[in-house]
Image: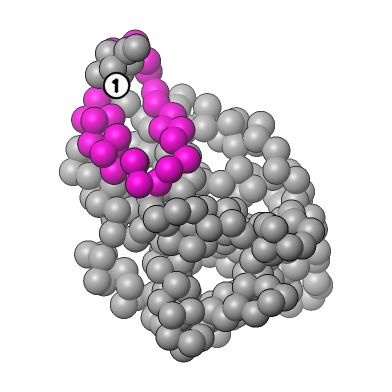
Amino acid sequence: TATVDELLQQCDAVILGSVDGRQHLGLAEQIFAAGKPVFVDKPLAHDLADAVRIALLARRLGTQWFTASALRFQVALRELQQELRGEQILGCEAFGTLRAGLGHLQLAWYGIHGLEVLYSVMGTGCREVRRVQAASGDVTTGIWGDGRVGVFRGLAYERQAVGWGLTVFGSQSICQVRLPAEYPPLLREVVRFFRGGAAPVSEVEMLELFGFMEAADASLAAGGAAVRVEDCLRRAGI
C-alpha cells in the first residue's frame, strides 16, 4: 500500500475523503506541506478547535483549500437564489437529516448539510445560537447581527422521514425547495478549484459554521440558553 508521501508525488491535487473528522488534522499536516490544492470532505474536523488548527496550518503553509457539503451547490438551490436575486433575505428555515457521529460536534456529521444550505442563503454574521430538543425534533435558531433569523431543524434519522430542503423569506416573496443529494455539482466546483479557480466557500464562513455548531451544543447543554458564536470562535483562537 502506498504511503501518503508516495501518493503526493503522483498527483496534482488532493481530495481528503475520510468522513471521520477526527483524522483530518493529522492528515492535513502531511498533505498541506506538499503545496497542492486540497478539498476536504465534510466534516472538516470533529470540533471547532481542530477546524481552526487546520485553517491556521493552511495559512502558514500557503495551502489553497476548501470544504463544503454537496448540497450547497445543488441546481435547485442556485435556481432559488437566482429567483430571489435583488430581494432582501429576511430569514431562512432549513431542514435536514441529523445523525450524530461518534466524537464529533452533534451537528457536524449530517447536520452540516442542512447548516451549509442555511449559510449559503444567510451568509456569515450569526451573533448567537439557541438549540432545543424534543421528541418531534431538534431545532437550532441563529440570530444574525442585523436581526435576521435562521433556523435549522434536524430530522431524526431513526424516527421520521428524512431529506433536505429550505424555506427562504424574502422582502417580496417566500420560496421553498426540496434538495436532492447529488454529487456532480460539488465535483464540478472541486475540479474548477483544482484548475486554479478561487475557493467557492471562504475560510471565514467555513470556520463560522463550526462556531455555530459549537455554540449549538453549548446551548443545548445549557437548557437552550443563548450562546454567542463570537465567544466560541475567540476561545478557539479566531
Q: Position of residue 52 (x, y in %)?
A: 29, 55
Residue at x 70%, y 50% (from the top left corner): 78
Above/below status of 136 relative to 208: below
The answer to whether residue 223 is magenta is no
Q: Quadrant of residue 121?
A: bottom right
x and y percentages locating residue 161 in the rendered image:
79, 59
Q: Judge from the rendering whether residue 175 lies leftward or rightward of residue 214; answer left or right.
A: right
Residue 86 in view? no
* 73 shown above or below 92: above
Against 43, is 156 above or below?
below
Residue 21 image position (x, y, % from top left): 40, 46
Compared across the picture, whether 144 is left or right of 114 comes to left
The spot of residue 37 in percent (x, y) is 36, 30
Using residue 157 as the reference point, say whether residue 42 is left or right of it: left
Which one is in front, 17 or 59?
Answer: 17
* Quarter of image, res 209: bottom left
From where the camera sits, is residue 104 visible? yes
Report the quarter where the N terminus lies: top left
The amino acid at mark 1 is Val
Q: Quadrant of residue 205?
A: bottom left
Please report the bounds of the magenta region as a residue range. 9-34
Q: Which residue is at a point 45% across and 54% down the rendered structure image?
A: 102
For disc 1, the neighbor class at 10 Å (few under 14, some 14 to 19, many from 20) is few
Question: In the rendered view, would you say 73 is above or below 191?
Answer: below
Residue at 74% x, 54% y: name it: 163
Q: Is residue 12 magenta?
A: yes
Residue where numbered disc 1 is placed: 4
